[in-house]
Image (tube, rainbow, N blue to C red):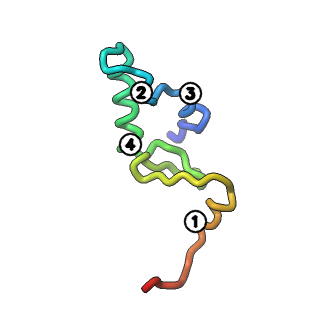
Amino acid sequence: MGLLSVPLLEAMPIRMEEFTEGSMFYPIVSKVREALMKEKLLPTDDQSFVSAASAKIARGGELRNLLNQDFDYCCE
């Protein structure tokens, strides 16, 4: 549905170190983290979504633009 946004993700309790295994919120945090790792839920710069396991973080538009370029050369 495309409803996940960066501000929403920043507000979510997904840092495992903040919730001990005995915490009543641990099962929720654990399942949310697992879903983010496996499912294509994280928004990308091109308006698509990617799983955390496949995500690459780039700070700044210049780096994102560099990584998005199509190169017609082959490395030996």
Q: Earlier in the sequence, mark 2 or mark 4?
A: 2
Amino acid, disc 4: Met
Amino acid, disc 3: Ala
Q: Earlier in the sequence, mark 3 or mark 4?
A: 3
Q: Tell me if mark 1 has few (under 14), some (14-19) or many (20+) residues whose alpha carbon lies within 10 angstroms of its own.
A: few
Residue at x-position 50% and y-position 54%: 56
Question: Label 2 vs label 4: CA separation?
Answer: 16 Å
Question: Label 3 vs label 2: CA separation?
Answer: 16 Å
Q: Earlier in the sequence, mark 1 or mark 2?
A: 2
Question: Label 3 vs label 4: CA separation?
Answer: 17 Å
Amino acid, disc 2: Glu
Q: Earlier in the sequence, mark 3 or mark 2?
A: 3
Amino acid, disc 1: Leu
Q: Position of residue 19 (x, y in %)?
A: 40, 21
Q: Relative to 5, say whether 60 is above or below.
A: below
Q: Quadrant of residue 63?
A: bottom right
Residue at x-position 39% and y-position 31%: 32
